[in-house]
């Protein structure tokens, strides 16, 4: 058990350093692609992990069951999220690819929101790992996909792309029904 704890700490510290370093490179060179490389590395790591919380395991088991049988455990799974499951399972891909894609997209919205203020990118990745927020993302996968779309919708609103803003909200709702509250409360916060 002690050895597993030491290995886990090492892996998380290494991942935090990688995201921090690539975030700094994105800031110094003014090239967002370095942040994307960091997200890909994070996604590979997160796609390979197993057993990080009960919800994570149930998502993998749900995916594997659908891949084998074509049966979704919950009929209530939101259409957008179930489409992701169906897409990857339809290609008969291992759950790694499904989990890595979800992990990438969950944090992509936050990185993209701060794309114009690249000096924050190193700290987003560092805090995301060291505060163990990444574990929350691994368990609340649908909720965090909706949050990513929220961040993208805020970016679109800030850039005055209002049609895209509402499209992102619709996609957030397709990931988790609770995002419907964005239609009510978000316009209040966007008033200048």
Image: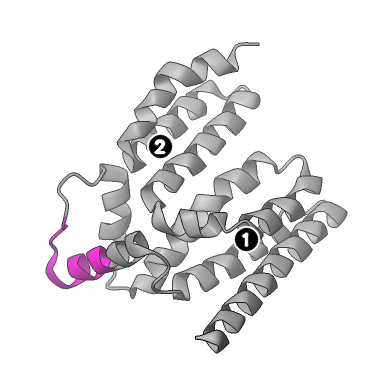
Image side of residue 141 versus residue 4, left or right: left
Magenta: main secondary structure = helix
Q: Is residue 81 magenta?
A: no
**Can the viewer see residue 90 in this picture?**
no
Quarter holding the C terminus is top right
Measuring from the top left, give residue 132's x and y in whole percent. 57, 59
Q: Is residue 191 left or right of residue 91?
A: right
Q: Are marks 2 and 1 in contact (CB under 8 Å)?
A: no
Q: Which residues are magenta?
A: 61-73
Element under label 1? helix
Q: Nearer the viewer, residue 80 or 126?
A: 126
Examine the rendered structure and indicate whether residue 190 appears above or below residue 43.
above
Count how many numbered circles sit on residues in the image.
2
Q: Could one spot residue 164 in this view of the protein?
A: yes
Q: Which of the numbered marks, if any, corresponds to residue 129?
A: 1
The residue tagged 2 is: 172
């Amino acid at each position: 058990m002690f050895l597993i704890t030491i290995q886990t700490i090492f892996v998380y510290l290494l991942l935090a350093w990688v995201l921090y370093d690539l975030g700094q490179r994105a800031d110094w060179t003014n090239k967002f692609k370095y942040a994307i490389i960091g997200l890909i590395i994070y996604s590979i790591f997160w796609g390979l992990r197993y057993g990080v919380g009960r919800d994570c395991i149930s998502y993998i088991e749900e995916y594997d069951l659908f891949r084998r049988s074509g049966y979704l455990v919950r009929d209530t799974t939101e259409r957008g999220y179930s489409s992701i499951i169906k897409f990857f399972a339809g290609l008969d891909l291992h759950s790694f690819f499904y989990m890595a894609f979800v992990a990438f997209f969950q944090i992509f919205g936050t990185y993209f929101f701060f794309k114009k203020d690249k000096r924050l990118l190193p700290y987003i990745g560092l805090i995301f790992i060291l505060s163990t927020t990444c574990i929350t993302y691994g368990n609340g996968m649908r909720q965090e996909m909706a949050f990513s779309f929220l961040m993208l919708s805020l970016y679109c609103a800030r850039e005055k792309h209002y049609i895209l803003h509402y499209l992102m909200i619709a996609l957030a709702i397709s990931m988790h029904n609770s995002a419907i509250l964005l239609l009510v409360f978000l316009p209040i916060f966007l008033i200048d």
